[in-house]
Image (tube, rainbow, N blue to C red):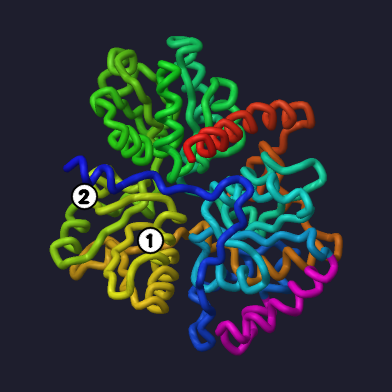
Amino acid sequence: MSSSKIAAQKTAREPGPEAALPVTGLVLEPDLPVCQTDLPLDRYQEEFRPYAEEYLALPDHKPATVLAYLERYIVPAQDHFGDSLLLLAHFYMGGEIVKLVEHFGGSIADSYVLALQARNQPEKKVIVESAVHFMAEAISLLAHEDQSVWITNPKAGCTMEMLAKEFMVEPVVDQLTERYGDDLLVIAYMNTSGRLKAIAGRTGGAVCTSSNARLIVEDSRKQNKKILFLPDEHLGRNTAWQLGMDLDRVVKLESPERGALRIEDTPGGLAALDRAEMILWGSSCGVHTIFNAGQVNWWQDRGWRVLVHPESPLDAVQAADGSGSTNYLWGEVLEAPSGSKLVIGTEGHFVRNAAQLGRQRGVEVRHLADIPNSTSAGCGCATMSRNDPPHLAGMLDLLRLGTAPDINRVRPGDVVDEITMIRDRLSGSEQAELVTNARLSMERMIAIVEAAK
């Protein structure tokens, strides 16, 4: 790949810690149904079922109907909490949900910007997030003591994070520490639990996101330590390639799906680990692993500009015209001149919303996997979509009534089983220790990003 193309794939600039959240530019279309599969009643917590029954009984799920339903619960909650209430959602939320959240004064962003919101807005005391659990926990890690963080559905997890639980990772970190001692540094992607972010903090490492991974890894290399990158192998490898690292010295551990890992079973054995500059955990995002260079080239041959998320495999990133976080991808659609033709390789709901935004601006947007006779599909994040209008309505109403289920409150270190809803919550002293180390890793990330501006 040419040096000019590598240069074109620069790290997207992120808003500073004090920057206001931008408005997405999305518009609710009155006759377009909410694009989200309805959940069966037994998927709701008992406290949320009345709100779900009412939602499912609506004559249709077009925005005007859904808005009227939501207003009965959201407006009283907003009146009750006033300016102390903050609604947040991630770009990957299904269909019209991000637009509904924004309609009621909430904000939409990527995981980096969402994580900063409690930290940067101390006047917001009640924070309700429609996204996945690790994102809500990241907000709570940086929150002030008098702020509470709530997730609309505790079952909203992340498949990548599920393959990098503490009980899987900690034994491997112990083995690597026994071999390399203080020469081991851990970088934890935002898509990890607070418990893994704490591991990064205590090893002198940092958290990273898809848009600042390049900055974080570049800064960490100055310490001349061996880097363990958690948990996404593709983001780690893509970052190493963008920095010009010798990919023969980027070594992936065995897949965590095979059970307990022994470092000596790494392909190439201990010799490969000893020689490695970066060690990759073997987890990935199923939404992004479907992309490849062949798809990218198919669109480029037809005159389209192709942009991909860096959780995609290396060959897709190398072939693409640009790569970056959801904020980067959204910004490219917002800034593209009328008449542009963009193809985006990321989560399906995001691309559908980007296509609508593009239509408003005279920009054509397509999904990378949308190729004739392709066996791949531009799927959405199924776990993210577990947050729907009944969960939002119920969460805000129950908070107003003072009867919100405690399992919906997210504290640092919380681990929730996405199937059983069993939660493991740390003791007060354990939570305090975790917050100290996890905040170190997150504040290091923020400092590195700000210093680069």
Q: Pick whichever, 242 or 276, lies toward us.
A: 242
For disc 1, the marked residue is 332
Magenta-drawn stretch, dominant element (helix, strand or loop): helix
Name the residue at 51% across, 83% down.
Answer: 29
For disc 2, the marked residue is 319
- Expressed as whole percent of the image width and height from the top left, the position of residue 316 reads 25, 49
Identify which amino acid the numbered label 1 is placed on. Glu
| 154 over 447 or under it: above or below | below
Q: Pick whichever, 308 or 134, lies toward us.
A: 308
Q: Residues within 10 Å of mark 1 (few under 14, many from 20)?
A: some
From where the camera sits, is residue 419 visible?
no
Identify which amino acid the numbered label 2 is placed on. Ala
Name the residue at 60% across, 73% down.
Answer: 100
Relative side of 206 to 266, left or right: right
Which stretch did the figure color magenta? 53-80
Name the residue at 59% across, 58% down.
Answer: 21
| 91 over 145 or under it: above or below | below
Which structural element holds mark 1? helix
- Expressed as whole percent of the image width and height from the top left, the position of residue 359 reads 38, 78
